[in-house]
Amino acid sequence: MDIRIEFLNYFKQKGHDIVGSMSLVPNDPTLMFVNAGMVQFKDIFLGTLPIPKNPKITSCQLCLRAGGKHNDLENVGYTSRHHTLFEMLGNFSFGDYFKEDAIAHAWEFITKNLELPIEKLWVTIHNSDDEAYNIWTKHIDKNRIIKCGDKDNFWSMGDIGACGPCSEIFYDQGSEHFNSNEDKIGGEGDRFLEIWNLVFMQYDRQKDGALVPLPKPSIDTGMGLERITAIKEGVLNNFDSSTFKPMIEEIESLSQKATEKNIGSYRIIADHTRAVSFMLSDGILFDKVGRGYVMRRILRRAVRHGYLLGFRKPFMANIIDTLIKIVGEYYSFLEDKKDYIQEQITLEEKRFFKTIDKGMNLFNEELKKTKKQFNGEVAFKLYDTYGFPLDLTEDMLREKDMIVNNEIFDKCMNGQRTKAKAAWKGSGDIAKNGDFKLLLEKYGKNKFVGYDSTECKSKIVALLDDNFKQIETLENNSIGWIMLDKTPFYAESGGQIGSCGTLIKNNKISIIHNTKMFFGLNLSKIETKNYILNTNDIVELKDIQINEIAKHHSATHLLQSALKQMLGDTVTQAGSLNDDKRLRFDFTYPKAMSDNELNKVEDIVNKWIEQGIRGKVEELSIDEAKKTNAIAMFGEKYGKTVRVVSFGDISIEFCCGTHVKSTAQIGSFYITKESGVSAGVRRIEAVCGKSARTYIKNIIYKMIKLETEVKNKDLLLGIAKLKEQIKSLKTELKLKDIQNNNQNPLKEEMNGDIKIIIDIIKNEDIKNIIDKQKNKNDKLAIFLFQIKDNKVLMACGIKNIDLKAGDWIKAVAPIVSGNGGGRSDFAQAGGKDASKIQEAKAKAMKFLKENI
């Protein structure tokens, strides 16, 4: 029996709509991951969204409890029933049926469809819920109904809001298997296994704690598929069921037969491989913070247990085929993304295997010094240097009955924790408490016409203030949000920015600053200028950016195809941004691209642009769309109908964005930068359209300026000459430095308080020597000679002496057939007869002594 299908079909026959599992990444800033089946219906339960046409829904939801407040990670492998990722079967009623039918449905499915023996079943209810008690007595002996308090049998979303009592169904696995003090209903033992929780949402808790009955009470139920599968298959441990057993057997085939001592490692590897595979298929990437870091922790915990089993190189990818055999029929995207999942897992394993030996050595050395509490600084070093997450270190210590000094670790880790918290908190709509439900109930969703036109006339359906509360009038020079019955403004999604533009009323213009989607409503942020806007006004709209944005978005599609052609099909989009001035495309690839690869990718895209390939947009059923081999964005969950954008057979993608009608409209395409984002993720930035023309104009302008600077029309030749000159000058300077180091000390003497220097210099610049000596001395007379190319160079300097340098140089220069002159403090000259340099030197000394 396929329990998953049996459950969904049962409730379908009871009038429920089947809804697919939502992404593991919730549209909710308070949650790191989807951790229960009701998460995708939370806004309906809270009253933020209206009740759907069919108020009865059933689902099988993938859930993850490995981060944030809901974290089962440390229990996985040590208990029979905890998992990081699990499937939750659920049925929901939004103001339709209540306790009577919820209990009847649950009892019928368990006893008739699943054929669980009644004598094995027990029920708990809240001790105040007489209604549930009376209903249950119609189905089960009253002695099998246990009343419990708020801790076990009362559920609430938060301190205020929807809440109510709940009823749990337990399965007795037998005292012959479990007979500890905790093997009781509500205990920590495994004898009585909770299999289904029925939540009766009937109250609205007020700030003062008062419970006000809801006008339309609702039902939210959840049953763990892994637990019920194990029960049906007659095994006492979920890991011994068909959900996990084949994976464990595959691990055994790769290593050794499991024993009672090491079976926990096999179970952890199987569980964590499954969790990481689904996380990767949902678009989550390994990272240092946030959800990506949780996934890294899960994988590295599995690798460490593989290390204990003797693995010294990547092995987890070998288990993926077995996982797909188990769940692939229901989750076909795992098969579609298998190569990518295996590649990413292997790359992350390689990263950890590089450091695990050194990390284990450090851990074991510190362990020898540890009696009870492991050094927090060493735990941090294991984390920071060797990539050991804290819970992995704690996991290893638990086996030794030890703990980490968390106070010290937290001090070391404080900065990273703050960063990590900021990284995951905040996915979801920027507003949750506006009048969205009111708008949806009153007007329904508005119409986007921007695929066909960049401008249109429209009616203002609703105006909202900054807090998304409905108002009748938006005053002069104010900022608010506007809902139009039809709009050309694209709401930010799929990497494409929200539209900007203009709104015209009576020839007066207001500015549209941004456009976003809230619960299916297309709303634009508007700033009024010199007039008032009212509900029901007829206005003219124009999107001023969409054409250039469309060029960049279409170029992004071509870029992805070119990258796959150049680097391989495992290249996968990891994020994107398309605006009117540039595009940014993140993709999975383990190393930096070479200049040659980037040039080839750029050439491929430009070739497709030149070919003028016509764009085609189709609305297809999801099954038809898959047959086109269209690229789907990781992490996106698609409905029954999808929009497929294609350019011939070179690019076919699921996409809701705006695009050009022909690749020729893109103009030209230039890659401006390639860089790394995180481990295994690269980023390309590029421009096209008007931005490409501006980019090339700037390059041409800079080239013209450079031609002027290097005084050569051939830039490369001019630069080559400059480099040769620089090389020559460096050689000359180096030679001079060597010569200067070999220069004999200057010949000095004192005449009273005046320093006198008269000397012949071999290499150094004589003017520089004079300047240095002036800086060193208060009173100075210096005359230097130098022979260069058989000629005599002369220079003299005076400081704080009653003598003019020009007179001194004129008295000496004629001796070497030269002449010169200068200022009173400095003079220089040149001579032709180097043979008389000693005579000139003597004359310089004689003249000086005669005149001071």
Image: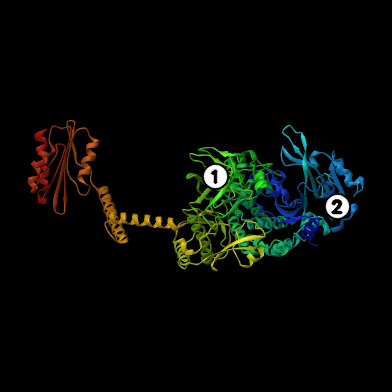
Q: Quadrant of residue 181?
A: top right
Q: Which of the numbered marks, if any, corresponds to residue 525?
A: 1
As rendered, which of 54 and 250 lies closer to the eye? Answer: 54
> Which residue appears at 14% of the width and 36% of the height?
824
Q: Residues within 10 Å of mark 2 (few under 14, many from 20)?
A: many
Q: Is residue 500 left or right of residue 417?
A: left
User: Relative to residue 436, is residue 225 drawn left or right?
Assistant: right
- Determine which of the numbered discs, if any, sits on residue 705 in the image: none
Pinpoint residue 597: horizontal percent, then vertical percent.
Answer: 47, 64
- Image quadrant holding the C terminus, namely top left
For label 1, the SS is strand
Residue in the image at 75% along x and 37% along y = 205
Residue type highlighted by circle 2: Trp
- Disc 1 marks a residue whose amino acid type is Lys
**Frontmost residue, 476 versus 239:** 476
As rendered, which of 818 and 568 lies closer to the eye? 568
Position above or below: 772 against 232: above
From where the camera sits, is residue 536 visible?
yes
Nearer the observer: mark 2 or 1; the answer is: 1
Can residue 71 be seen here? Answer: no
Mark 2, residue position: 107
Q: CA distance from mark 2 to mark 1?
A: 51 Å
